[in-house]
Image: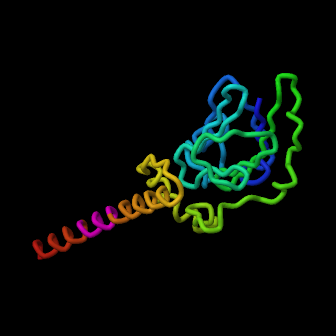
Amino acid sequence: MLNLIVTNGADRGQNFELGESSIHIVGRLGGAVSLLDRAVSRIHAELRHKDGQWYISDMGSINGTIVNGQQIIDPTPLNSGDQIRIGKTIFIADIVGANGKSSGRPAVPSRLRRPISAAPSEPQLLTDISDDQNTQTQALSSAHEQIKPNVKAPGIFARAANILTRSILVFSWSVVAMSTMITLMFLADTYK
């Protein structure tokens, strides 16, 4: 069994107990690990138990999945004490064996006693937006998630695809607004 203990974020204090018999989805859509964090994608990450080992995989999320300070791309093995960041939510993994006891590693190893962050050279897309700005951008981020590409390319390529998708969305809204304005001007001149 895998226990995910939320140490930071909107769901702080929650403990998610996951069995080994199925695949578990982490996100905002009500999977096994359903989070309130708006920086978490609807289907953000996947947890699975295979051959005696727990693995976490990012599902092409906007803000990525970070394990022990490193953004992951491929399925990554988890150990007790690993720190996982999904959006603004931080978990500590605790793997419990068949005997009901933890694997023996401390819940928070000394190397992880500080909150993790993305690599300094990587810009944050939605996690750095303040709460006031977040309310203003909810419509855009919701629309973006509906049309976002399924890109699993590392770092700069995924960010470039996200920026391009947002640019196309904003451009299409501008074209609609300009077309409406031109139509209204034409109609105003026609019916003078």
**Count of picture labels:** 0
Residue under the image location 73 percent in, 27 percent down? 52
Q: Give the colouring mode of the picture.
A: rainbow
Position above or below: 174 against 37: below
Q: What's the magenta bit mostly, secondary-structure-wise?
A: helix
In the image, taking residue 47 as reference, residue 189 lies left or right, namely: left
Position above or below: 30 against 109: above
Q: Quadrant of residue 134?
A: bottom right
In depth, the one of 40 and 104 nearer the eye is: 104
Q: Quadrant of residue 122?
A: bottom right
In the image, taking residue 105 as reference, residue 84 lies left or right, namely: left
Q: Position of residue 85 (x, y in %)?
A: 69, 51
In the image, taking residue 94 as reference, residue 67 lies left or right, namely: left
Instruction: Specify the quadrant that holds the C terminus.
Output: bottom left
Position above or below: 13 against 137: above
Q: Position of residue 175 (x, y in %)?
A: 28, 66
Q: Is residue 176 magenta?
A: yes
Residue under the image location 47 percent in, 51 percent down? 145
In depth, the one of 192 and 51 nearer the eye is: 51
In depth, the one of 151 and 178 nearer the eye is: 151
Q: Quadrant of residue 75?
A: top right
Q: Is residue 165 magenta?
A: no
Instruction: Specify the quadrant that holds the N terminus.
Output: top right
Task: Tell me which segment is drawn in magenta.
Answer: 172-179
Q: Position of residue 188 (x, y in %)?
A: 16, 74
Residue under the image location 81 percent in, 44 percent down? 81
Residue under the image location 76 percent in, 54 percent down? 8
Q: Position of residue 185 (x, y in %)?
A: 19, 74
